[in-house]
Image: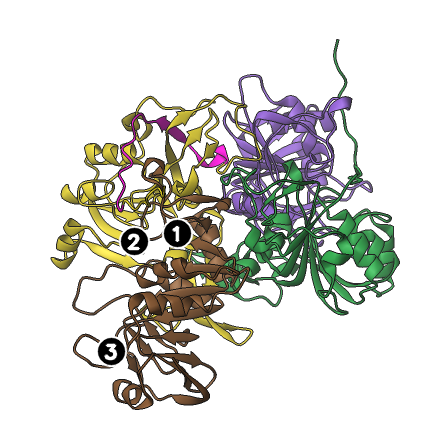
Chain colours: A yellow, B brown, C purple, D green
C-alpha cells in the first residue's frame, strides 16, 4: 500500500468541505506544509476553523488563507506579526481562541490518544481558566482542558517511506507529530521520499498508521522570519 | 545608578547553577546567555522543541529548520536533542526545567505575573509563557522598576490580565532584587547608588527589607 | 461439524480488509495471521510497542529485544516502526487500530466481554485487553460456543468480571457467527452441519436470526 | 557534566529509602534494568512499592526482590507466570494494584508531564472504574485516572552519551521512556556508552534532562521467556 500521492490537490481530493476543522503543523514558518496550504487556497474551501500554533505571515503560510478569507476561526497560541490577521480580527471578521502553547500541544495529543480531557496547572488564575472546571489534586488546583481532533491534519516532515512512516528534522518537528495523530485524515508533505526499509525502525517519529497520504514537495521555500548570526572571529 | 539591561541580565545569570536546565524568554532574558559564569554549565531549552540550544549560527550555517522560540536562527551543540511541542511542554509542565527567566509588564506582591496582553491593544497571544510560569521550578522575572511615565510596575495587584498567579520566585528590576516566599516579597539587593527610600517611592507592592540587604 | 481452531481463525481472517491495522490477541487469534487472504495487506500491531510485526524469526535471528505482546520472539519487516508503551496505547485508545481479534471466556448479548479473570483463581491481570476493547474500532471475539461442561458461554449477562462493556462487534464461535448492532445480536452464519436448533439449545443469549443466514 | 557512574551501587547511592516508590521499565523480561535490580536487592531497601508492567519471573528481573521480600506492593497490568508472586499474594503478604496496560503507561506519562489526571474510556463498566469519577464527553462516558510519579525510576536503554541522552532498541523500549520522565530521580542502565555528539539529535528518544545518572552494563543476560522460531524452507 503506497501512500505517495502525485500532487497536493490529489492528496486532498474528497476530504475537503466548507466549515471543516483543519490542524496545520509548524512553529512560525518552521516546519509548515507549504504546498498543502497552497492547495487548500486553490481548492476554495471556506469557513475553515484552523488549529495551528501561529497563522503564518502576511504573504506566506496560513496567512495566504486570510487574504482569500477562507478562515473563519483560528485556535492558536500566538498570532503576532501578521497585519492581515490583526485587521480582520479587529473588524470582527475572524474568530480567535487562544490556548497556552503547551495546552494546545497537549490537547492535540489527547485528541489523537483518546484522552477526552486532562487536568493542567497552566492558566490557573488567568482568563484561560474562566468557565473551566477546577479540581484539586494533592492540594494544588488544576483546570480541565479537552482533547482536540480535526477533520484533516496537514503536517510537514522531512522524509517519508511508502507506508507513510515519517521522520522530522530539527525544530521543524514541533507540532507536526501530535497533529498527525489527531486528524481523522492526515496528509503529510515531505522533502524526500525513501524506499521501504530505508528507515531504521527505531528512528521513525510518526508511524504510518497516522498518515493517509503524502506528497513530496521540491524546492520548499522555508523562509526565515528572524535571521540572527554571529561573526567568525579571526 | 540603575542597572543597565546588560547588568540586569548579568545579575539574573547569578541565579544559574551548574547542571541547570534553563529556559530564557524573549528580549532581555536572551542576554543572560552572555553572562553564564565560567564554572557553571547550563543547558538551554527552547520550548519549540530543543534541549541544548547553541549560539547564533555563522552566516553560512543558517538553517531554516533550526530556530528558537523567538523564531531566531540558532545552532546546535554536541548534547542537543530535538522533540515535539507536546514533549517539550510535558518537560516544562512536569517541572523538569530548573529555571526560567522571563520579562514582565507587571508583578504583584503575591507573585502574580502579567506579561502577555494589554487590553485594548491587539493581543498577540501568550505563546508558551503561561506554561512556563506554571511548570518551571523557579521563575525569575526581570523588568524595569517603573513604566515610562514613572508609575510603578511592582504592584499590590496586577491590573493587566495575568500570565500566572503566584508564580514569581525572584524579581530583578533595574533598581533592586526581590525574593518571594510564603508571605510578602523581601527586598534583598539594591542597584548601585539606589537607596531604600527610592525603592519605597517607586514601588506600590508591600515588601519586607532583608536584614542582609545587599548594596552594590 | 463444528469449526476447528484453525477454521475459526480462518473465518476471523475474512474480517480483514486491505490496509487494515490489526491487533491479534494471544492464543487462537494469533493463528489468524496464517490465513490472511492473498489480495489483502494488513499491518499487525503489537501493543508492547511495534507496528509491522513480522513472522517468528529463523533460529539464528532470534533477538531478545524483539518480542510480541505474548512475549514470543518475532521478526521485523521493511515497514516496521517501534514506539513506547504510552505511544502504543495512545494509538489503541485513540481509535487508530481498525480491528482487534481477541479470545473470550464469556460474551453477553449486549456485547459485554469477559476474558481476564475468574474469581477465586489467581488473577494474572488484564494486560492490554481493557485498552484494546475500549479503543479499537472493531472488536472480533472468538471462543468455543460452550464451556467444557457444555454450559453456554454466550449469555444474557456475563457473571465473570468484565473486560469491557458493550464492546463486541462480531462473535465467532466454533458453531456460529453473531453480529452485534444497536439492539440484539444477529446470528449471521452457521458452521457446517450445525443447525439453528443446536445454536438455540447451546446459547443463553437472546439473538435475532438474519434473513440471510449463511450455512456452510 | 558527565552522568556516567562507575557502578550500579554508586548510581543508587543516597537515593534509596525504606517505603519508597520505584518505577522499573520493561515488558516481561524485555528491556529491564538487570543490574540496577540486582543492586536494589543488594542494598536491602525494604517495603518498596514497585510500578512496573510485570514482576519478572521467579529467578530473574523484579522476581528476585520477591525472594528477599523487599516488595510491599506491585502496581502492574499483568503478573502471570511468577509462582513466588502468586504464593506471597495468596498469603496476603503482597499488595497488588492492577491497571490496564495503556492506563498504566498513560499514568506514568501524565506524572512526568505535569498532568494531574486524565479521562479515558478504558475500564468503563469494569471493576477498574469502581470508585473513580465518571464524566461524559460528547455523549460518551470516561473515567478519571491520575498521574503517577516515583521516588526513583530505573530504566534500561541501549545507548547513552555523557549528557544522559538515551536511545532504546526495538521492543525493549516499551515503558522505559515514560518511566524515565516520571521519576524524581532516574537512573538508566545501558549496553553502550557513546561520546557526546555521536547521536543524531533527531534520533534521541529520552533527552538527558530526565536522566540523573547511568551505568554501562556488560553481558546483559536478556533471557527469552518464549522462544518461537520458524524453519528455513529449502
Report the disc number at residue A148.
1
**Image spot of residue B181 (x, y percent):** 47, 82
- Which mark is first along the chain, 1 or 2? 2
Residue drawn at x 14%, y 43% as measured from the top left: A67
Q: Nearer the viewer, residue C132 or A48?
A: A48
Of labels 2 and 1, the one closer to you: 2
Q: Which residues are magenta?
A: A207-226
Disc 3, SS: loop
- To which chain does the residue with label 1 belong? A
**Image spot of residue C19 (x, y percent):** 50, 27
Give the labeled residue for mark 2.
Answer: A75
Q: Where C79 sits versus D184, above or below?
A: above
Asked if the residue at tag 1 contacts the one at tag 2, i.e. Cβ–Cβ closer than 8 Å, the answer is yes
- To which chain does the residue with label 2 belong? A
Same chain assignment for discs 2 and 1:
yes
Residue A220 is a magenta residue: yes
Report the disc number at residue D56.
none
Amino acid at each position: 500500500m503506497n501512500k505517495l500521492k502525485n500532487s497536493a490537490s490529489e492528496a486532498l481530493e474528497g476530504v475537503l468541505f466548507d466549515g471543516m476543522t483543519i490542524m496545520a503543523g509548524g512553529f512560525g514558518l518552521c516546519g509548515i506544509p507549504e504546498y498543502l496550504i497552497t492547495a487548500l487556497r486553490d481548492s476554495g474551501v471556506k469557513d475553515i476553523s484552523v488549529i495551528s500554533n501561529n497563522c503564518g505571515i502576511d504573504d506566506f503560510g496560513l496567512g495566504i488563507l486570510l487574504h482569500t478569507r477562507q478562515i473563519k476561526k483560528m485556535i492558536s497560541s500566538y498570532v503576532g506579526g501578521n497585519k492581515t490577521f490583526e485587521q480582520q480580527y479587529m473588524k470582527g471578521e475572524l474568530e480567535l481562541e487562544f490556548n497556552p502553547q503547551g495546552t494546545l500541544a497537549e490537547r492535540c495529543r489527547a485528541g489523537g490518544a483518546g484522552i477526552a480531557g486532562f487536568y493542567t496547572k497552566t492558566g490557573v488564575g488567568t482568563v484561560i481558566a474562566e468557565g473551566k472546571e477546577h479540581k484539586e489534586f494533592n492540594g494544588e488546583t488544576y483546570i480541565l482542558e479537552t482533547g482536540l481532533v480535526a477533520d484533516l491534519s496537514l503536517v510537514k516532515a522531512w522524509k517519508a517511506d511508502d507506508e507513510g512512516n515519517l521522520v522530522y528534522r530539527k525544530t521543524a518537528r514541533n507540532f507536526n507529530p501530535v497533529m498527525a495523530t489527531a486528524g481523522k485524515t492526515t496528509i503529510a508533505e515531505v522533502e524526500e521520499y525513501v524506499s521501504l526499509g530505508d528507515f531504521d525502525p527505531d528512528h521513525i517519529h510518526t508511524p504510518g498508521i497516522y498518515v493517509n497520504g503524502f506528497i513530496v514537495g521540491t524546492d520548499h521555500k522555508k523562509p526565515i522570519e528572524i535571521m540572527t548570526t554571529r561573526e567568525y572571529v579571526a | 545608578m540603575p542597572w543597565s539591561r546588560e547588568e540586569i541580565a548579568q545579575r539574573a545569570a547569578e541565579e544559574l547553577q551548574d547542571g541547570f536546565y534553563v529556559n530564557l524568554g524573549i528580549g532581555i532574558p536572551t542576554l543572560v546567555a552572555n553572562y553564564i559564569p565560567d564554572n557553571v554549565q547550563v543547558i538551554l531549552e527552547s520550548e519549540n522543541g530543543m534541549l541544548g540550544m547553541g549560539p547564533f549560527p555563522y552566516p553560512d550555517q543558517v538553517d531554516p529548520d533550526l530556530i528558537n522560540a523567538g523564531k531566531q536562527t540558532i545552532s546546535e551543540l554536541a548534547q542537543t536533542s530535538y522533540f515535539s511541542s507536546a514533549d517539550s511542554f510535558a518537560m516544562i509542565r512536569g517541572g523538569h526545567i530548573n529555571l526560567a527567566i522571563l520579562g514582565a509588564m507587571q508583578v504583584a506582591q503575591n507573585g502574580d505575573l502579567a506579561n502577555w496582553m494589554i487590553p485594548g491593544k491587539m493581543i498577540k497571544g501568550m505563546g508558551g509563557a503561561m506554561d512556563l510560569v506554571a511548570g518551571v521550578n523557579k521563575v525569575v522575572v526581570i523588568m524595569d522598576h517603573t513604566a515610562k511615565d514613572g508609575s510603578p510596575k511592582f504592584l499590590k495587584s496586577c491590573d493587566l490580565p495575568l500570565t500566572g498567579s503566584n508564580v514569581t520566585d525572584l524579581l530583578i528590576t533595574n533598581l533592586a532584587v526581590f525574593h518571594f516566599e510564603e508571605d510578602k516579597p523581601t527586598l534583598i539587593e539594591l542597584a548601585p547608588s539606589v537607596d531604600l527610600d527610592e525603592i519605597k517611592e517607586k514601588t506600590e507592592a508591600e515588601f519586607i527589607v532583608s536584614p542582609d540587604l545587599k548594596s552594590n
